Amino acid sequence: PDVPAIAAAPDGKIYVAGGGEPPKPPSLWEVDPVTGAVTNWGTPDAGASIAQAVAATASTVYFGTGSTVPGGGGSPARLFAFDRTTRTYQNILPSEVSTAVSVTSLSVLDDLLRVGLKGPGKSLLMSIASPSTYEVIPQTGERLRRRGDDIYYVKNPSVMSYSRITKKVTN
């Protein structure tokens, strides 16, 4: 299977966003490096054609999907929160960005989940404790880091900064 994204939870379990070969939609997989057990936690969106992002906390695995089907078929972007205890999925992508093509990247930044989106070319900073609380960064970037209320990221060829206080992007 295609494995575009991988993340480690604090307890050491590994989570993989992977798809089968078309027309199979992507699935979320868990690998326990201690026992060697591999578990397929299923496909939360049968209309998705890609999964490019995964991130994990102690309680939740975030799994981003979308579709790149020619002609516009398939599902729009979705961001699923997989509860590691109940083993259930919930789509938590805000309706404001529900027309995005796909979730391209995820990062856990302390108490925030950073979500990169293809389509609107924006990023979200979502509260991990309350995902309906979020703010929009008006562009995407790579290799995000957080220092207090500032989010730093690479937007080639520059290093950018987003201030959570002023809501402005600078380079």
Image (cartoon, rainbow, N blue to C red):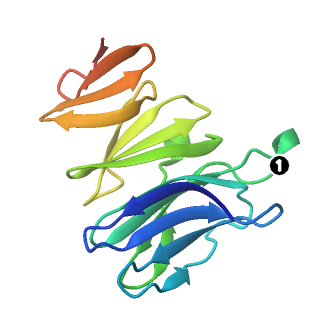
Residue 155, compared with residue 22, is above or below; it is: above
Residue 144, compared with residue 25, is above or below; it is: above
Residue wearing tag 1? 73
Q: Which residue appears at 41% of the width and 60% of the height?
A: 7
Q: Which residue appears at 83% of the width and 63% of the height?
A: 23
Counting from the top left corner in percent of width and height, residue 66 is at 65, 50
Q: Is residue 92 visible?
A: no
Q: Is residue 128 visible?
A: yes
Q: Amino acid at mark 1?
A: Gly
Q: Quadrant of residue 84?
A: bottom left
Q: If the image is split into quadrants, where does the N terminus sit?
A: bottom right
- Total marks in image: 1
Residue 134, compared with residue 88, is above or below; it is: above
Q: Quadrant of residue 160?
A: top left
Query: For the residue carrying disc 1, how many other residues have a C-alpha within 10 Å: few (<14), some (14-19), or many (20+)?
Result: few
Residue 82, compared with residue 152, is above or below; it is: below
Along the horizontal axis of the image, is 149 left or right of 18? left
Counting from the top left corner in percent of width and height, residue 119 is at 62, 33
Counting from the top left corner in percent of width and height, residue 20 is at 73, 66
Q: Residue furthest right?
A: 71
Along the horizontal axis of the image, is 121 left or right of 86? right
Q: If the image is split into quadrants, where does the C terminus sit?
A: top left
Counting from the top left corner in percent of width and height, residue 89 is at 50, 73
Along the horizontal axis of the image, is 119 left or right of 161? right
Q: Which residue appears at 54% of the width and 28% of the height?
A: 121
Q: Which structural element holds mark 1?
A: loop
